[in-house]
Image (tube, rainbow, N blue to C red):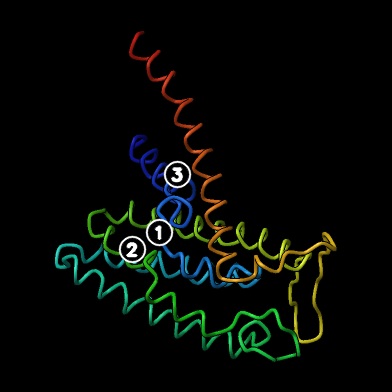
Amino acid sequence: MEQKKRNLFLTFFDGIYLKNPVLSLFLGLTLAILVTTNVQASLYLGAIVLVTMVVVEVFCSLFRKVLGKILSYCLAAILSAAISCIAVMVLSAYYPIVAIPGVGGFTNVLIVSFIPFVSTTSAVLVKGQQATEQGFGHALFDGLGSGIGFVLALCLIAVFRELLGTGELVFTLDADRQLFVHAMDFTLPFFLTPFGGFLMTGLVSGFHASICRAFENRKKPAAVKGEQA
């Protein structure tokens, strides 16, 4: 039982860091480039992906005995498309200030045209296929870990892009209020372009890979000492 709990924890931790969908596996790069010009938009879209990953992986795991590789992709696409439609309707009805451009006169909104990309992103489709090779527990913890890792990766990239591109972080609270965190007057609008997003994603991924490599190198001497003992 203790070993099973440990394996579930490792599955959860791998999804967040060591096997992060964006920074390690390079999945969902379209969303990472399109939406990370704003931290708030990244947080909302990342939350939608988190819910989608959990639902897709759980269902694909439950029906793994009847699903092949192709059918798992189909089920993942159908489920993610349904969740995307629900997310669009809920945000448009209850929080239009971040869903519909122009509402309240603010410009930093989560444009609803980004949300349908969730239904075709490789992060969800690939994870759904992998879940057919896992039990329910591992699929659930992998979905949670990978979803949280996806949110953290988007937000981290967005912090750098928004700060460098605009010099501040902006959060829309409601139709009449915005929260500004001003950091600097010098800006590089280049980082708000798609190529700037691609470049920043690569830089953050490279830094993440160097940390993972250093972590692995620290584990090797400990493993060698254990074998010698």
Q: Residue furthest top?
A: 229
Q: Residue at x 83, y 64 (%)?
A: 182
The answer to which of marks 1 and 3 sits earlier in the sequence is: 3
Residue 198 locus on image (x, y percent): 53, 62
The residue that mark 1 highlights is 143
Circle 1 — which element? helix
The residue that mark 3 highlights is 18
Q: Residue at x 61, y 71 (%)?
A: 193
Q: Quadrant of residue 174?
A: bottom right
The answer to which of marks 3 and 2 sits earlier in the sequence is: 3
Q: Could you tell me the amino acid type at mark 1?
A: Gly
Q: Is residue 216 above or below residue 57?
A: above
Q: Is residue 214 above or below residue 152?
A: above
Q: Could you tell me the amino acid type at mark 3?
A: Leu
Locate the C terminus by quadrant: top left
Cα separation between marks 3 and 2: 19 Å
Q: Could you tell me the amino acid type at mark 2?
A: Glu
Q: Quadrant of residue 176?
A: bottom right
Residue 47 locus on image (x, y percent): 53, 68
Locate the N terminus by quadrant: top left
The residue that mark 2 highlights is 57
Cα separation between marks 1 and 2: 6 Å
Q: Give the number of marks.
A: 3
Residue 59 locus on image (x, y percent): 30, 68
